[in-house]
Amino acid sequence: MNWLPHISTALVAIISAIISYLAAIRQGKTEIKKLTETNKADIERLMHQHKIDIDNLREKHRLEMEIKTLDLEHKIQLMQTESNVRTSENEQSLDQKLKSEFVATFLTQAFENPDQAAGNIENLKKLSDMFST
């Protein structure tokens, strides 16, 4: 019976250790579950943020491309306008040159052969009347 107080003390210590071990296992499982849920929430939040970032990049790229397209269209319009101005200037210059040459030729002919010049004036009047009606 000498052993009974020692056994009871040992038994209480063993039971206490087993209960502490089981509580630690349970607490560990609870903490792992919390961490898993927290990590899952963090991963979902990061995935959502990543999706938003990708959408923002796409929108930024779309806007940049739209700006480049508009800029290119503007440059094309400027080039067309410049081309039209040059063409108009060339046409006016050519028109002036033709008129000058016509007047010079007409005056030269009028001084050299006045009768033929009078006939040409009549022909021009008839031609003008044909186009006006």
Image: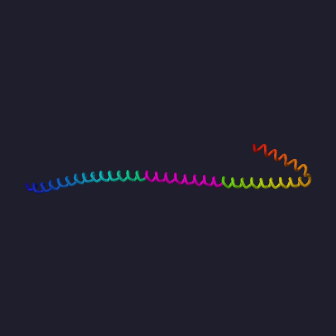
Q: Quadrant of residue 74?
A: bottom right
Q: How many circles with numbers are drawn on the protein?
A: 0
| The quarter of the displayed image where residue 127 is located | top right
Instruction: Please determine whether, in this image, residue 129 is positioned above or below residue 72.
Output: above
Asked if the stretch drawn in magenta spans residue 68, the answer is yes
Does 34 sit left or right of 8 as displayed?
right
The N terminus - image quarter: bottom left
Q: Which residue corresponds to the image point at 87% horizontal and 49% vertical from the top-left?
A: 118
Q: Main secondary structure of the magenta part?
A: helix
Q: Residue at x 52, y 53 (%)?
A: 63
- In the rendered image, residue 102, in percent from the top left (x then y), is placed at 83, 53
**Which residues are drawn in magenta?**
50-79
In front of the other: 16 or 131: 131
Left or right of 103? Residue 36 is left
Q: Position of residue 89 (x, y in %)?
A: 73, 55
The location of residue 113, given as percent across then percent down, is 91, 52
Q: Name the foreground residue: 84 vs 105.
A: 105
Q: Residue at x 75, y 54 (%)?
A: 92
Screen quadrant of the C terminus: top right
Q: Residue furthest right?
A: 112
Instruction: Report the coloring of the rendering.
Output: rainbow
- Please tell me whether residue 55 belongs to the stretch shown in magenta: yes
Residue 16 at what x, y percent from top left? 17, 55
Q: Residue furthest left?
A: 1
Image position of 62 (left or right of 109): left
Could you tell me which residue is drawn at 38 percent across and 52 percent down? Answer: 45
